[in-house]
Amino acid sequence: MLNAAPETRTYENPMQSRFAELQHEVARLRDELESHPIARLCAMGTVPESILRDWARIQYVDSTLWIPMLALAKGQTKSPRLLQALKANIRCEAGDDGIPHVTLCREFVESLGEPTYYGNYQDYAPLAAHSVGVMNALASMSEEEMAGWLMAAETLVPTFFAIFRPGFARI
């Protein structure tokens, strides 16, 4: 069920209005993901194993590129708040208080019996081009776009994992 339209209210600060729009769009995307046919297949345990394995490899490529992508964003950021958020995200991803996320992802992929070495990501996970595309796109994003994209990505990633997790139960 899609979330209701954002409240029609006037914000004194235009950024508050854009943030409210972004929150609504992220909620809409989450609802769309949760009602996608693949979400139903994962919940029923009937998603094809090849799709699950492809998804795992895509996550691994994405994971290996995430910290460099955040570092690129950090290098072009002037906003103190965005800079603070990027630094915190880099520390979290690198496992500052625990296990690095890329290590967790590698262990996940290996637990499926999938290799974690890849020379050409297009051979390893053909659908992972989005990760490279996003990293390249950051170079031309404004700080506002970058902040919005990161907020959306970090908010939706748990939804993706929650959708796909039941599908892996049989592997």
Image: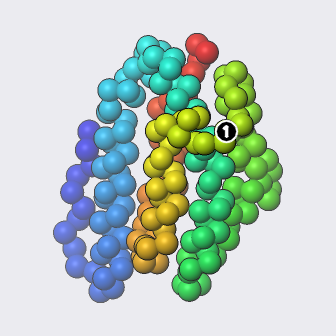
Question: Residue sitting at 77 percent across and 54 percent down?
Answer: 95
- Looking at the picture, how far across and down is residue 66, in whole percent? 61, 56
- Looking at the picture, how far across and down is residue 58, in whole percent? 55, 38
Residue 150 visible somewhere in the drawing? no
- Count of number-bearing discs: 1
- Looking at the picture, how far across and down is residue 2, in whole percent? 25, 44
Can you say whether 167 is above or below 1 in the image? above
- Looking at the picture, how far across and down is residue 171, in whole percent? 61, 15
Rendering colour mode: rainbow
Crowding at dot 1, Cα within 10 Å, few <14 / some 14-19 / many 20+, comes out as few
For mark 1, what is the residue?
A: 118
Residue 54 visible somewhere in the drawing? yes
Can you say whether 152 is above or below 144 in the image? above
SS state under label 1: loop
Q: Quadrant of residue 85?
A: bottom right
Which of 134 and 10 lies nearest the eye of the viewer?
134
Which residue type carries mark 1? Tyr
Q: Quadrant of residue 19?
A: bottom left
User: Position of 107 compared to 45: left or right?
Assistant: right
Question: Residue sitting at 52 percent across and 61 percent down?
Answer: 135
Question: Residue sitting at 31 percent across and 58 percent down?
Answer: 24
User: Position of 20 compared to 77: left or right?
Assistant: left
